[in-house]
Amino acid sequence: MRRRVLVVDDDRAILDVLAMRLEAMGFDVTATADPATALAAEAGRFDLALVDLRMDPVNGVELMEALHARQGRLPVLIMTAHGTIETAVEAVQRGAFDYLTKPFVPNELRAKIARALATRRWTRDRERLQALGQTLASTGVVARVLDAVAQAAVDATEAERAVVFQLEHGRLVPMASAGTPPPAWDALEAGAAAAMDKGVPVTRAGADGGTIVAAPLVVQRGPAGALVVETAARAVPDEDDLELLALFSSQAALAVRNTYELERLRSGALAALGRMATEVAHELKNPLAGLRLYARHLEQRLARRGEAEDLELAGKIAATVDHLGGVVAELGAFGRPPELQRAPVALAALLDECLDLAQARQPGAGIEVVRAYDAACPAARADARELRKALLNLLVNAREALVAGGRLTVATAWAPDTRTLTVRVEDDGVGMSEETLARAFDLFFTTKPEGTGLGMAIARSVVERHGGALAVQSRAGQGTRVVIRLPLDAGEGGA
Ligand SMILES: Nc1ncnc2c1ncn2[C@@H]1O[C@H](COP(=O)(O)OP(=O)(O)OP(=O)(O)O)[C@@H](O)[C@H]1O
Ligand SMILES: [Mg+2]
């Protein structure tokens, strides 16, 4: 992209000559004799300013300071005639990048401008990279990271838009974008594919006469996606832009890798935690069974003696022990899931049953239940008992999120081409913060005073054992959508 240079000199003749020279050097030049015009331009408009030292009524150093007040890092070259070197040195001390002596020596002009621009670019990019680095460090959420990368790419290259594509199951999926929405995705996707193919940044014609530049995202062994920017018709990306884009895409790749690594570590730690939980559950099972027996025994005795008050107490002990027993059984089942007993299951009927159970467990108030069952759904080959457990947890969560009432939608769908059944459980309740969403599947993670933090982990484990996948989208204050995909002819994992 053409660099924009501001020239301010009250000597018309010098102004014209300088403007001509700079234009010949390929710059986009704004030349003016009026300091007010220079200050009226929007902040950030220029990449470089050349300012004459002696002007009336404002002197060049004052104008420079006014420019710096609006755009702190704008490099300013102060122009001065022979004999006023001291003042020029003072100008540098007050923030000028350098000074140029009149009459201009062509090579000096060129060299000082190049140096000023290179330094500016470097600081600017370093700031962006730092900002990017901070975002990457502060979040473990891939989507956030990719958003930051796309935004930084737009800012740094002044492109119309940037899109990050990731390779998912052999297809390029746009994961994040910034700038104006693309008129068409095809050209961007083709650019991404070409960059991944070549392994280096590539340039090609964009949809509206602009240019598409794509850089591959290389994670571990090979490209995992690409960062693609598209410029407006008039802007042509230069070498620097390409290099910068490559830099951003390597940052993005790093972030993606770190996040995957984090996920791997987390699931390793979770597996260990799960094993420990199972062992604890196992240890607790027998003493709890004993406690329960004693409590029942006590209840019977007190009942025989007609001691109503104590009987009530004993009843409470028994109920609490039963509750504990339930938690322990769930934990044990989580660590050592039973073999799946698959049989044809009608999803709609199972969902209806779970909706009733969930309502009994969490009555709530003002909850409108919407059922949208796809009549074309064939029976799933699934373990109804296990699936019931998963769905019930999701429905209870949804009802718990609808503390202030709202809508609970339960939908099913059948996709014959992929032979996939989909169940969607959606609520417009409290939703989850980013942190909660990231941890929702962690064992024992709960935000509820009475929660055990097992529901989501159990639901996902059941779905995955059926060869399916469970995905959650949520926004604080807006609601939550959980989507379960079950393959009809699942790999008979565990069956
Ligand atoms: N539909 C939802 N809306 C808002 N937050 C949810 C939703 N589903 C889950 N969560 C969040 O995820 C956390 C974990 O859910 P999970 O079902 O695993 O445990 P829990 O509901 O807290 O306890 P329990 O083990 O009793 O189900 C919840 O505490 C809640 O913060
Ligand atoms: Mg729950």
Image: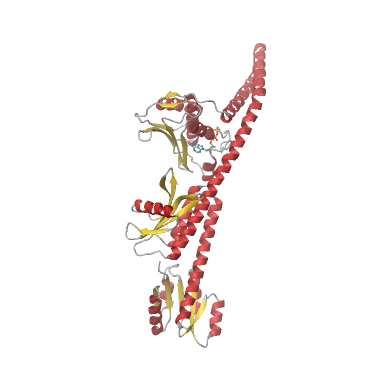
Which residue occupies 39% across, 84% down?
Answer: 13
Q: Quadrant of the N terminus?
A: bottom left
In the rendered view, tell whether residue 421 sits above or below residue 211. Answer: above
Q: Position of residue 337 (x, y in %)?
A: 55, 28
Q: Residue furthest left?
A: 208
Which residue occupies 54% across, 34% down?
Answer: 457
Q: How many marks?
A: 0
Give whichever of 33, 224 is nearer the camera. 224
State the image quarter where residue 367 is shown. Answer: top left
Asked which colour scheme the image uses, the reply is: secondary structure
Q: Position of residue 99 (x, y in %)?
A: 51, 79
Q: Is residue 494 left or right of residue 414?
A: right
In the rendered view, tell whether residue 85 sits above or below residue 449. Answer: below
Give whichever of 437, 294 is nearer the camera. 437
Q: Position of residue 350 (x, y in %)?
A: 43, 25
Q: Can residue 392 be seen here?
A: yes
Which residue occupies 35% across, 33% down?
Answer: 416
Q: Position of residue 400 (x, y in %)?
A: 50, 34
Q: Residue furthest top?
A: 304
Q: Can residue 73 be seen here?
A: no
Q: Is residue 321 left or right of residue 387?
A: right
State the image quarter where residue 442 is shown. Answer: top right
Give whichever of 389, 21 is nearer the camera. 21
Q: Residue furthest bottom?
A: 83
